[in-house]
Image: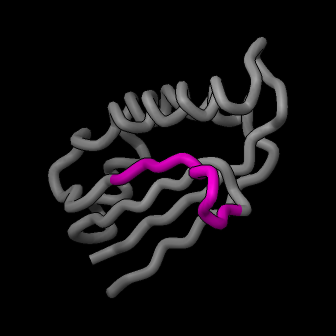
Amino acid sequence: MIKHIVMWKLKDFAEGQDKAANAKKMKEMLDTCANLVPGTLRFEVALAQPGLEATYDVVLYSEFADKAALDAYADHPDHVAVKPFIGAVREARQCMDYEV
């Protein structure tokens, strides 16, 4: 199994919206990617929550059956389609994939 974790820090203002609006839109866009490919075992998108520690604004926690499933997700046209928006609103990105 491959775990794929990505965190984004968003710009205060981008694409005509503030950080909160862009975070919400980003979550909605990523949520549509949850069942794109066979082998997706878990797919969870969360936003930083007031009162809980967070150094980033949006996190994706996902699990894939194997590297082939992760690669299929990464290359899927619906996933690729969200990248321009995310690239426009993000200030920083951290990612880690690991096998368990």
Q: Which of the 4 image quadrants contains residue 6?
A: bottom right
- Magenta region: 44-54
Would residue 75 be found to the left or right of residue 59 on screen? left
Q: Quadrant of the N terminus?
A: bottom left
In the depicted structure, whether residue 88 falls above or below residue 37: above
Which residue is nearer to you in this view: 59 or 37?
59
The residue at the far left in this view is 38
Residue under the image location 49 percent in, 65 percent down? 5
Q: How many marks?
A: 0
Residue 22 figure quarter: top right
Residue 53 magenta-highlighted: yes
Residue located 47% across and 49% down the image: 46
Q: Is residue 52 above or below residue 37?
A: below
Q: Is 4 on the left-hand or right-hand side of 1?
A: right
Closest to the observer, 96 or 25 = 25
Q: Position of residue 17 (x, y in %)?
A: 74, 17
Extreme-top residue of the structure: 16
Give the image location of residue 31, x and y in percent: 36, 37
In percent of the image, x 35 and y 48: which residue is there? 73
In the image, 6: left or right of 92? left
> How is colour applied across the structure in the image?
one colour
Report if residue 74 lies within the magenta region: no
Q: Measured along the vertical axis of the image, is residue 96 above or below residue 17?
A: below
Which SS type dominates the magenta stretch? loop
Name the spot of residue 25 as percent of width and height, x first: 54, 25
- Residue lying furthest bottom in this view? 100
Where is residue 48 shown, x and y percent of the image? 60, 51
Residue at position x 70%, y 35% from top? Answer: 87
The quarter of the picture where the C terminus appears is bottom left
